Amino acid sequence: MKVSSEERFYDYYADASQSEVTLQRFLSIRDLVLRIAAKEIGSAIALEVADVGCGAGTQCMMWAEMGHRVHGLDVNESLLDLARTRAVNGKYTIDFQVGSAVDLPWAEESMDVCLVPELLEHVAEWQRCLSECVRILRPGGMLFLTTSNKLCPRQQEFNLPFYSWYPAPIKRYCERLAVTTHPQLANFARYPAVNWFTFYSLREVLVASGFKCLDRFDVMDLTKKNAIARIVLVLVRSSSVLRWLAHVATEGTMLIAIKSRGA
């Protein structure tokens, strides 16, 4: 029997959502956000957490198990059904909703944390998606975002070398192939990556909306680094040129933004 691209997408992400790599990644995100929240917001207890593009709900459950009130949204109803089943089996109460990242179902200033991991690159109206995240966050709330990095030649969105450096017309051609005759190019994704960002471009947008923005080098924990790594990190933090070069060498963009209490 021939398996459709969408079925392979479901199978791929259903399996990947429980891999050891995924579990460790989401655990590190949760612990990082809670550490920064305790420092920047002053509280990391019983937070209202929105997971935009939650997929099979793995990250939602990691937050729910700590007592946070979790809300998950995804466009893929099949993956959300799997998330609901897993949540019931784990005895977690999580608000899962089918919906669009450009029209979030939650009220204005209703969330303390908004998680947007590896989603923005797939959303054609990415500016509207960011505006929605800004809207739902309370003053002092935190946005955690990971996405593509066009500065770095390494990427996992397309199975093509140096894809992030391709000219825009060639990227558009590859995108068409990925949604038609060659879905394996983008890991059978229903919505392959169409946007490529840098920390600097995203920071410009969010600062204009009243956010303080931190990159991955700002939030690294020096106490958990060896002596050489601490020296390198201090140098990167102290030099804009070295920081830019560090971004070039880093696969993916990570950004934490704290909403001004006066925004």
Image: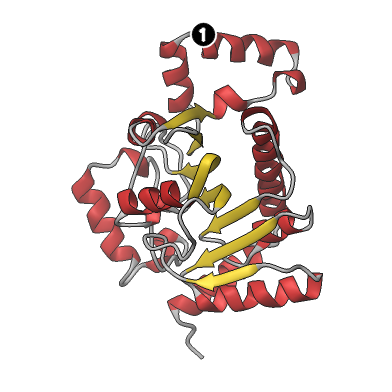
Task: Please provide percent x and percent y for residue 14.
Answer: 62, 69
Q: Nearer the viewer, residue 55 or 132?
A: 132
Locate residue 17 relative to residue 164 in the image: left or right.
Answer: right
Locate residue 201 relative to residue 167 in the image: left or right.
Answer: right
Q: Nearer the viewer, residue 77 or 138?
A: 138
- Under tag 1, what secondary structure? helix
Task: Please provide percent x and percent y for residue 177.
Answer: 29, 64
Residue at (27%, 50%) from the top-left corner? 171
Task: Please provide percent x and percent y for residue 238.
Answer: 51, 8
For residue 36, above or below residue 104: above
Give the colouring mode of the picture: secondary structure
Residue at (55%, 40%) from the top-left corner? 142
Quadrant of the rendering where the C terminus is positioned? top left
Locate residue 52 relative to residue 220 in the image: left or right.
Answer: left
The residue most toward the left is: 169
Residue 203 makes an appearance in the image: yes
Q: How many marks?
A: 1
Q: Nearer the viewer, residue 150 or 200?
A: 200
Residue at (33%, 32%) from the top-left corner? 208
The residue most toward the bottom is: 1
Q: Residues within 10 Å of mark 1 (few under 14, many from 20)?
A: few
The residue most toward the front is: 262
Locate residue 246 relative to residue 70 in the image: left or right.
Answer: left
Q: Nearer the viewer, residue 205 or 106?
A: 106
Mark 1: which amino acid?
A: Ser
Residue at (73%, 69%) from the top-left corner? 93
For residue 136, above or below residue 184: above
For residue 206, above or below residue 174: above
| Tag 1 residue | 238
Residue 194 makes an appearance in the image: no
Task: Please provide percent x and percent y for residue 25.
Answer: 66, 46
